[in-house]
Amino acid sequence: MARIGVFVCWCGSNIAETVNVSKASEISGNIPGVVYSVDYKYMCSDPGQTLLKNAIKEHNLTGAVVASCSPRMHEKTFRKAAKDAGMNPYMLEMANIREQCSWVHDNKDEGTDKTIDLIRMMVEKVKRNHPLEDIKIPVTKKALVIGGGVAGIQAALDIAAGGVPVVLVERESSIGGKMAALDETFPTLDCSQCILTPKMVEVSQDPLIEIMSFSEIEKVEGYVGNFKATIRKKARYVDTDLCTGCGTCWLKCPVKVTSEFEQGLGKRKAIYIPFPQAIPSRPRIDPENCLKLTKDRCGICQKVCPTKAINYDDVDRLVEVEVGAIVVTTGYKIMPVSEFPEYGGGRYKDVVTALQFERMVCASGPTLGELQRPSDGKLPETVVFVKCVGSRDPEHHHSYCSKICCMYVAKQTMLYRHKVHNGNCYVFYIDVRSNGKNYEEFVRRAQEKEGAQYIRGRVSQVYKDGEDLVVEGADTLTNSQVKIKCDLVVLATAMEAPDGIKELAQKLGISYDQNGFLTEAHPKLKPIESSTAGVFLAGCALSPRDIPDSVSEASGAAAKVLGLLSKDEMHKDGVVAFVNEATCVACQNCIRVCPFVAIQLKDICNRKGEVLRQVADVNPGLCVGCGTCTPSCPSRSIELKGFTDAELFAEINALAEL
Amino acid sequence: MNYGYYPGCSAKSTSPEFDASTLALIDFLDLGIKELKDWVCCGASSMHAVDKIIHTSLSAMTLDAANSEKKDIMVQCPACLAHVLEAKEVLNENGELAADVKEAVGKEIEAKMKISHFSSILHDEYGLDRIKEKVTKSLNALKVASYYGCLIVRPQELMKYDDPENPMKMDDLVEACGASPVEWPFKTKCCGAGTAISDTPITLDLTYEILRMAKQNGAECITVLCPLCHNNLDLRQKKIEERYGEKFDLPIIYYTQLIGLAFGLDPKVLQLDRLFVDPFPLLKSKGIL
Ligand SMILES: Cc1cc2nc3c(=O)[nH]c(=O)nc-3n(C[C@H](O)[C@H](O)[C@H](O)COP(=O)(O)OP(=O)(O)OC[C@H]3O[C@@H](n4cnc5c(N)ncnc54)[C@H](O)[C@@H]3O)c2cc1C
Ligand code: SF4
Ligand code: SF4
């Protein structure tokens, strides 16, 4: 016989104002099977939980219904309390009389009646509930980090510091990401290379970190604690074990092509490392430009390589790694100027992106930090910066704000004025967003002490008038049109999700937003978790961010990974789908609809091992209990534990008083 | 091709040479396009600012005129084009304004017809290759700056004419006729339009910049497709030159006139003599005439 307790919460006045809680508790006491009922001011408080625990023990309760807030809020709390008192936690249910009753109604009588209905429904369900066990899953104590920018680097270092091995996959031939290409960084103007390269070296020297550069994710299977990732190590034509990074090959290679790392402003060879501090410091051959690989000529690098590391017959290789957790730090890309013909992008060489400007002033850049405009090498005496190019422009491009352009433009005006003391620099802006520690002070410094002239308004057109570039725009503070003749225009183009991100997200089973940025599980409370357990996110893969934010999230994700992998086995909610093998006809409807690929076919064999038939089989490690499969089954063979037809129909029948 | 020609009021008043050269091309290419019988003035630059219902109804009546002849509409003036396209959109969306318009016009008007600018018809439907074949008198590498003005490309969603930042249709057409299009940045800059009447100096400033930029980029003449642009650049060129103390001498020639010349049509028929900035010295020096 069921012995059920009902606990009606006031939630202060949140519930009690619209629901007569004492009446609800009294009437609930008369529902068949209910042996105890009570109302209390705050059920979630310590005394509230003690009340629950004591009642379970004293009245030998077999089940309980807590009528209070949403189960999203406190189901865990009350189920844990029940467990502490010796009851199977799944025998406790919550009736949501706050979000679904008191907060949305104002008539107290009706609110009270509805509360009683909700309680009756849950009592009937609890009567049919079965005790469930948490699912235990063994974990692989190894992590995968995808994307080797500053966020990925930080995540890898922190995970390794916790003693867990890490595989760091980067699709370019070196780790470092965008930060490796920056000059000095706001708000302290420390040199990006000086703070990043030591970290890159640390990664390469950490025995727990394996870098797989020039590699991409091919496939990911499995589930939290037990992922199996297939990684494509793209053909590099250089044996990285034999190569010592001596540099003879790229010195001698006769082919010069445009360097991606230098944002098109410098050259590299066909065999190259993207920048001198590259990690790993091993070159790769670019097969599209190598003479040997395109025309079967040259072959110089192989001849000069002292360690015989060059292999023109190299092919892609697939490797499998098993990991317990994944961190995605795939960063961003910026919009190219060619998307902005109205600003002369793609038409005039001296209209550049902000990332190109970083290379133009960087001591390690193509001109070794000597500022020259691309068209003719002239020192620009007047520079115009245009902010929000492609950002905050829902009609044409993106509606979002790229968040950090305000800051790096302020920085770049300073970098410019430090090189050209009498230079003029103008900034067209919509707003100045400088909401970080010491950020506002930094922007003020650019405006008040370092001579940047800010003009509030948008630019309508950039064109060439003789030798000069002319920027035409509006000054909305003086309500006038402005025309500025200048030598160089820097467009702070929008930060976008990187290429290939959607495909990667699909492989990982995580979601992305309409802009292609990865989506967090909860915007406030789970900002670095993805929608898939065991997959974490950090840095610009989520949306535009600066370095401090990217790094803090990376450390946060690392802490989550370490927490997850600290145990030998994981416990997972017992609410998963299960199949009645006697009635399943293997139509595979459920397999097709399961968004988490948690259902497969399994063979039913006789004693001799001959396959008699097949049935659907749920992998409880992968199943998240979403319930999508259950209505798809024509023979009602797949059900969700804790939400079986019997339990749910009992609720409905109770409401209909059948 | 089943177009009826909607000339608009400029063609019948200030810009008869645009009308004449258009009809000459239609005739020469045997396009079979005739003027719509009952077209109505679109309200020009003022009506849309005064009364939305009357403004839309005027263009709706032109749509109706096309319907009664079972024709699509060919337009030359960009303002007329914008207004008939807008009326078509209003009628098809069938909202409150459409109801008001129906009441004002006194009948249901179907808005299914195609509406195209003549340059699009030549460029996209007749085709550059066929135009090339018809050229008997090459424009001899005449350096032409194509000036489209602000209206034909904007708003892009409505006009769907060409790349709003760098349209190429007229450039392509005159190139097919043997001219050398000039690459310049002011193809779609505003000429001041109607402010020429209310605040002339503003227009003079704007048109000065257009002329200066065309000249700087090597143009020997400017070709246009809008009667208002034409007025501001041609009629007022002397004034601009006086105001800035700078001589331009840039003939402003309708694209239909240039194409007509390449087809060997009589300059009189094309009414080249009606232009204020005399094009004949240039055309002669280039061996086109
Ligand atoms: C012009 C400019 C100036 C800036 N200046 C500053 C500054 O002064 N201070 C500051 O705090 N911030 C600055 N920033 C911002 C800074 O660049 C970012 O905050 C930071 O680089 C983010 O790091 P990340 O690791 O998230 O992304 P990224 O640096 O973009 O790194 C992502 C990495 O993932 C790799 N990757 C992508 N997709 C895949 C895939 N599918 N598989 C494997 N690998 C993949 C990429 O190759 C890359 O190496 C600036 C940005 C710009 C554009
Ligand atoms: S073989 Fe290719 S990579 Fe090697 S030196 Fe020649 S061109 Fe360069
Ligand atoms: S849908 Fe039902 S019957 Fe079909 S395979 Fe799945 S469990 Fe079996």
Image (spheres, coloured by chain):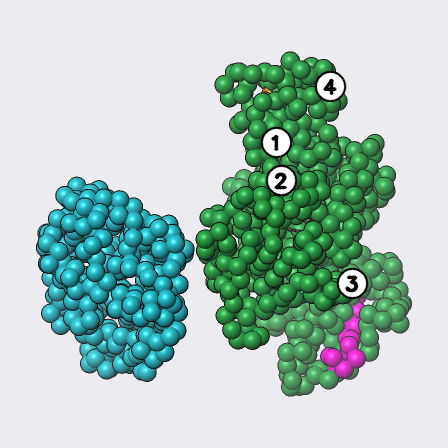
Label 1: element kind: strand
* Mark 4–mark 1 distance (CA, rounded to whole Å): 23 Å
Residue sitting nearer the eye, A283 or A111 = A283
Q: Are marks 3 and 2 in contact (CB under 8 Å)?
A: no
Q: Mark 4 — residue?
A: A242
Label 2: element kind: loop
Q: Mark 2 — residue?
A: A262
Look at label 1 and name its amino acid. Arg
Residue interval drawn in magenta: A1-16
Look at label 4 and name its amino acid. Leu
* Mark 3–mark 1 distance (CA, rounded to whole Å): 38 Å
Q: Colour of chain B?
A: cyan
**3 vs 2, front mark:** 2
Q: Earlier in the sequence, mark 4 or mark 1?
A: 4
On whether ligand 2 comes within 8 Å of the CB at mark 1, the answer is no
Residue at 50% across, 58% down: A470
Q: Mark 1 — residue?
A: A268
